[in-house]
Image (cartoon, helix red, strand yellow):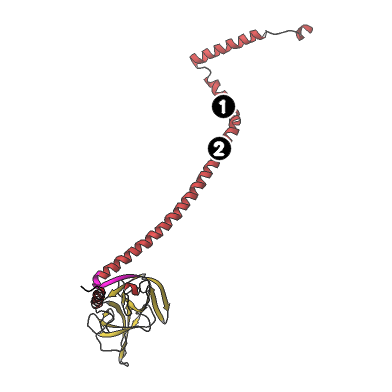
Amino acid sequence: MSKLLFTRGPSLTIRLALVMLASVILMTVDHRQNHLDGLRSALSVLVYPLQLLVDLPESAGGWFRETLASRRALAEENARLRTEHLILKAQLQKLEALEAENLRLRELLDSSFKVGERVLIAELLSVDLDPWRHQILINKGSRDGVFVGQPLLDAQGVVGQVIAVTPFTATAMLITDPAHALPVQVNRSGLRSVALGIGSLERLSLPHIPNSADIAAGDLLVTSGLGGRFPPGYPVARVEAVTRDPGQSFARIYARPLAELDRAREVLLVWTRERAGGEATDAAEAADEGAPAP
């Protein structure tokens, strides 16, 4: 019994030698005949969960860092794109405003070529659209040669006339003001009348026209030149409605102004040829008077 308890096996050197010999044999067999591929595959399947478990902290940390970095980068990029979007929208609005202003100025310049007289573009500073007073303030005054009674036009038609002048500004009354009356005539038939403002930006009244008068809806009204304020031939309005009542002596006639009275931001100040010629003569006389005698 004691012999079994104290019996010793092969020494460690022999065991190591046997293990090394077995390893060499297995490597040789595997290298030449690939008999251990199935065993290797089975062992890799068994070891794979252990590999995942060992690699889990590192992979989880990397995923977390990448997620935070990506989220931060996306947030920064989103903020930058939102800022650029707002800036571009603001610039686009400005460009649209400049484009509209450019179009208005082109129309005014084209209108000035058609007018044929001396003209000056003025901008509106304020608008008074009280029901009983339609007036505007423009940024041109007496130092620019503006005078009381001077006609104002836009690209479509007559706007009004100047009623007060200061050195740097002028006040003009629109043709729709209830106190304004404008001599006109029907472009088609030559019928003369007076277009009265009634306090509406979209309507003028033509009173005291007989029922038998040659006027119809759609007729163009132009300035007649009577009164000396407005040169003849400027478009004013287009007839909208003609109501003839056999029981009344005069027809009820309304016309729509052609000028964009509620949207215009620039107007044309017009000098007639006679007025411009008179100013040139006055300037020449003043220059002669101020010149030293020879």
Part of the protein shown in magenta: 113-122
Residue at figure coordinates x 63%, y 10% from the top left = 16
Image quarter of residue 119: bottom left
Q: Amino acid at mark 2?
A: Trp
View extreme (right): residue: 2
In-front residue for pair 25/197 = 197
Label 2 crowd bin: few (<14), some (14–19), many (20+), radius 10 Å:
few
In-front residue for pair 35/208 = 208
Percent from the top left, x then y, of residue 121?
Answer: 32, 69
Is 88 on the left-hand or right-hand side of 10? left
View extreme (left): residue: 294
For label 1, the residue is: 45
Is 227 on the left-hand or right-hand side of 76? left
Residue 233 in view (yes/no):
no
Q: Earlier in the sequence, mark 2 or mark 1?
A: 1
Tag 2 secondary structure: helix
Residue 120 magenta-drawn? yes
For label 2, the residue is: 63
Image quarter of residue 19: top right
Q: Amino acid at mark 1?
A: Val
In-front residue for pair 176/26 = 176
Tag 1 secondary structure: helix
Image quarter of residue 286: bottom left
Residue at figure coordinates x 52%, y 15% from the top left = 30
**Numbered marks: total:** 2
| Quadrant holding the N terminus | top right
View extreme (top): residue: 3
213 is higher (above) or lower (below) than 49: below
Percent from the top left, x then y, of residue 21?
Answer: 58, 10
Label 1 crowd bin: few (<14), some (14–19), many (20+), radius 10 Å:
few
Residue at figure coordinates x 33%, y 78% from the top left = 160
